[in-house]
Every structure is written in C-alpha cells, then in structure tokens.
Image (spheres, rainbow, N blue to C red):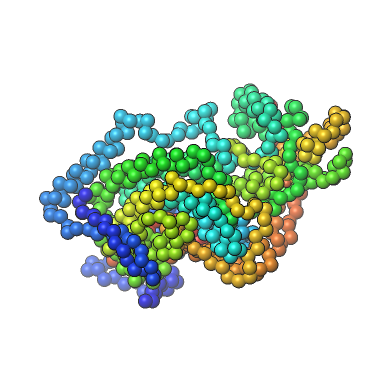
Amino acid sequence: MTVHVRTLDELLHAPLEADSDLTTQEYLVNMGPQHPIAHGSLRVVVRLDGETVKEVIPVPGYVHRGVEKMCEHLNYRQVIPYTDRLDYLSAIMNNWAVAKTVETAAGIETNDRIEVIRTIMAELQRLQSHALWWGVTGMDLGAYTAFLYGFREREIIGEIFEETIGARLTMNYIQPGGLMYDIKPDFAAKVKKLLPYLKDCVEQYETLLSGNVIFQERLRNVGIVDGARAVALGCTGPVVRASGVPLDLRATEPYGAYGKVQFNVVVGTVGDCWDRYYVRLEEMRESIRIIEQLIDGIPDGPYSTIRYNVELTLPEGIHYGQVETARGAFGVLIVSDGKREIPYRLHFRSPNFNNLWVVTAMAPGWRIADFISIQSSLDLVIPDIDR
Amino acid sequence: MIHAIKVAQEERLFAGKSVSVAVITRGRPPGYLRVAFSAVTGLLRGLWLTLGYLWSPEAIVTRQYPENRATLQLTERFRGNLRFKFPNEKAQEDHAAFIEQLAHETQTHAHVAADLVREENETRWYHNCTGCGKCQEACPNASIKVFTRQGEILEDREVDRFVWRLDSCMFCNACVQACPWDAIEMTGGFENAVYDRRLLVYNLNRLAGPRINYIEEEENPDVRKRMVERRDRYGGEVPLNGFALPNLPPVTTPMESGSRAIDADAQARLT
Ligand code: SF4
Ligand code: SF4
C-alpha cells in the first residue's frame, strides 16, 4: 500500500475550491506553531471548508536542534543524555535503546539484575507517561480536572524516580553495560506499596472521563484509520495497536525481562480515537501487571558490568536496535567506522514522527473540534518529531 | 458506562510469533433512555470523585514552593548544582552551619550564600581533585574546563581553577561518574536565577593545590600553607567560548575584564 502525502508547497499552489452549498470559500489556516493542543511547537496547516477539515499538512521543524548531528561528535555514553531530550516522557526507554544497541554491537554482557531493574523502570515510566497523556487529553477536550489528576500520578511516580535516579525528567539512567546507580534498598517496598494505589487510579480515570457522555461522544468513531493504512504510514505503539495490529516490540522481539513475564498486547477493533484512548488505559493495567511479576524477585548482582571510563568502540558497520517506548518503536541506527569511539553517523527512528503523519489520513472530513480529539489521541511529543 | 466495553484475551499469530493479545470490543449501542440515564449518572459519579478531596485534603500531593522553602528536603541523589566534595564529614558540617548563619544574616538562600563565602577556615576547602580532566572529557556539552598548574612544592600537575558552566550544564551526572577520585558531587542546589548570565560561569574550587592527602602528609604548617593558594568564585579567565569538538578548533575569547566586573558584583551582593 502506498500513501501519498502532499507537501506544503503543493498545498499552497493548488487551487482552492468550495463544494458547500453556500457561496463560501475554502481557506488555509495555521494551527500552531503556538497552539494549546500541540503541547509544543508543531505547526499544522489545515485546508478548511467552513468548519470542516479538508486536508491537513503538518509542518514540523520548530524545535529542531540537530541532535543526530551533535551525536556525531559525542561518544556513546554522551549520546544518552541527549536522548532524554527527544521524547522526554519516555526518557528511560530512549536511554535503553542506545544502551541496547551499543551492548549488542560491542558484545557487552549484562546480568539479570540490570535487566529486571531496567524493565521495572521502563514500565513505571510508561505508566507515568500514559497518566500524563490521559490528563492532557482530558484538558484538550475541556476537562481540566483530568489534567490535575493525571499530574498527581506523575508526581507520585516522579518521586520514586527522584530518589533512585536524582532526576524527574531527564533521566540519563540506563547506561551501556548497566545502570547509573543501583536501586535503593527500600525501592522494591516503595514500588509495591504504590501498585495498588495506581490500580485504584486507573479506576478513577474510568469514573472521571471514560464514563462521561460528552467525552465518549467526542471520541467514539472519530478519526478512524484501518490497520493497513496505519502500518503503511509507519505508525507504531498504541496508535497502530488501536487499529488492531498487535505490534509491540516487548512481545514480538522480547528484550530486557519482558521474555519472562506474562502480559497482553492490547489491541483495538475499530481504530478510532476511543480505541486509542482505551488501549492506553488497558496498557496501564498491563504495566502494573508486569511490575507486579518482577518486583518481588529482583536478582542480586552488580548494577553495572563495565567501568564507567572504559572506552567503547563499536566494530565497523551498521548497528540497529529498537525498544518499545510509551509511544511506539524507538530505534537507534549507528554507523561506526570501527576506529573512533564516536559514531560516524547516527539516526534516531522516533515513533512520534511517523505517528504524526497519520493525521493526514484521519482528519479529512471531520470538524476542527474533532481534529483536536484526533491529535490528542495520537499523544505526540514534539521534540521527538523534530529532534 | 454508556457504551459497554469488553476486554477479551486471545492468542494471535503475528510476525511469526504467537502473541497473547487483549482485544477491546464494544457492545451494541444502547437505547435512548439508557444513554440519558447513564449520561447523568456518569457525570455525577465524576463529580462525586472530585468532591472527595473536600473531606480528605491529606490526599493532595502538591508541594507549596516557595512557601515550604525552609523545610524543603531534596533527595540525596538529586542532581542539582555541582560542587567540590568536602574532604571529610566534619568539614561539611562546619560548612553547613556557617552557611546557615550567613544565609540568615544576608537574607540570601543557603546555596547562594555557600558560594559567596571567602574569609573562613582554609582546611575546609581541601579537596580530592587531582586535575586529571576526566570530568572535562566526559562532559557531553563542554560545561567543565579544568585549568591545571605546575605545583611549586610537589612539582606535579595540580588543579588551578575548576570552571563550571552552569548555563550550559544539563545535569547529566556524567562528570561525577567519570571522576576517578570522587572529588565532585551534585547537590540539591537549584535556585540559580541571576541578573547577569556571566554569573553562571564560575570556579568550583576555593583552593588551587594538590589533593588533600598530599597536603596532610606534609608536617610543616608553613609548607602546607604555601602548597595551596586562594581562588575565588569569579577570578581568572573564563572560557565562554563554546563547544570544543574533536574536529573543530576551539575559539578563545579571554574574559578578563568581564570577570573583574562580575567579581565586584558578587562582592556587592554579599555586603
Ligand atoms: S552534569 Fe553533565 S553537562 Fe553538567 S558538567 Fe557534569 S558532565 Fe557536564
Ligand atoms: S574532578 Fe575528578 S575527574 Fe575532574 S579533574 Fe578533578 S579529579 Fe579529575
């Protein structure tokens, strides 16, 4: 299946037409780069006929920092803090992607303890990220209360991160060959105490938003995209799963401790905004399940298998590794010349970039207000798109 | 729930693997009456939940900063401002007590006061740094510049000025991890607002000189004194020259005159 996405240039030079009954004219409107629902600087040009969206063209690039180019001057440990600044809500998972790629390429072994702690941390962050997304979606659709509830859970999980890692957002925690710090002795007990509370929170989310008639009506059957089209556009994560494709790297190519735990890949049936909403809620329950299975038996061992100052040089060639972040597959492609300890070229395959383009398939035909629901249901993090 | 949701578990073949999936399905749309009824109950249940905070305010997790500034405790691993580690616990305690008093007197925050201190017990500033520069190498965005000098007494390389650029630091902790001598640490300091951004580039060491163990090996107190030399926060050349990349030559712009002005500024704030 091929997908054609018009460029902004093509859109601007195409003749505008009006096919409504009244003598109206089509017009182009910029949504963004400063628009409250974009949660960052994302510009979207929409072709409108009255309130109806005819065409959408995203114009990213307002937060472009050239991270990949910068990484060509940095060694592999120094690349990791930069990945915190891509999809900042999945910082630990982004760190993991680089660490995993470097470990595989350089043949660095890790131990069970490291992998289990990584998995627990990643799942905690997935929970945190989905909680924030839930709140923000509520806010986008006019329910400000939800925003505060989402942030409540984010704060509570953030405190656990702060104790173990020392940071709340820019983690730089997972390093090639291990972790930056070992967990504290009371980490497991604290997380265990938190799990029933989080379960309760997901129920509260259901009560606050899922059961709300206005909210349901704004999401249900809006912005439908079928599985084949979502795959053709390169979507991953909850977006493609909501369309019924069980693509989840945690299950299809297990890494870390995911091979040892039981969990379901949550998929939808319709592929509308409501499915994308509910897939994430169910994923929160699955994440809690994964942590529950791991938290009791964290194996013993060192928290890092190599010393910090060891020189990491990858063999000559192209190395690729990917993990499932809260928004989809995050991949790292490293081209190494085999001589220096910095990459020759580096590329991040970021989930949000591909997830963004699905709006071009979803939005046409819907009203502006529905476009808000659609963009919100994609859970975009703009710095990850622009890099 | 207006529209019934069912989550059913099943096994599906995907990408040549059997994946256990949870499928979300919905039932038939309910009739008009039922929608009307559950719309009202759904809204009321949401309202009831939020009302709960009225009689259990202890569930609120928000921390009131800056009202709680006096009692604010950050975690031990919190990655805030970088500083030289104190050589021993006693020095750290002495220093903390002194700073508290100073902060009280000058009405500044303890972290600001800590860096403005000059006239006090010298041995408190003995350090573990050898000037090896490993931290500078590890820093991803060139926020550290270690100036070394040839020591007079020991005739070995030792740290002269350790310049840290708070303005470009991203608090990644790489320098602390890379230091083989455990000489630096990240603290809970985070209140860094200033009116002149040049104030954000400063020396971390108060003494230029060798590691503490070399000083302590020396028995003659006069020689000990001569081994170290005072360094203040804003003295000397400041490398405001951006990133030195492996393939690019660094740009050098000495900021001598600028740093004098800053020095006076800092003095003025203290008095
Ligand atoms: S914390 Fe990171 S950015 Fe800051 S000085 Fe240390 S290594 Fe450099
Ligand atoms: S702080 Fe540590 S790594 Fe940096 S120069 Fe001093 S001893 Fe070397």
Q: Nearer the viewer, residue A374 or A187?
A: A187
Whether residue A269 sits left or right of residue B32 in the image: it is: right
Answer whether residue A45 is visible to the viewer in this image: no
Answer whether residue B10 is visible to the viewer in this image: yes
Q: Nearer the viewer, residue A76 or A360?
A: A76
Q: Say above or below: B243 vs B64.
A: below
Q: How many marks?
A: 0
* Occupied quadrant, residue B93: top right
Q: Position of residue A29 (x, y in %)?
A: 38, 62
Question: Please, which residue is most extreme toward the bottom here?
Answer: A1
Whether residue A283 sits left or right of residue A346 in the image: it is: left
Location of the C terminus of chain B by quadrant is top right
Q: Position of residue A22 (x, y in %)?
A: 23, 67
At horizontal 33% and vertical 52% (from top left) the residue drawn is: A281
Q: Nearer the viewer, residue A322 or B63?
A: A322
At horizontal 66% and vertical 68% (from top left) the residue drawn is: A338
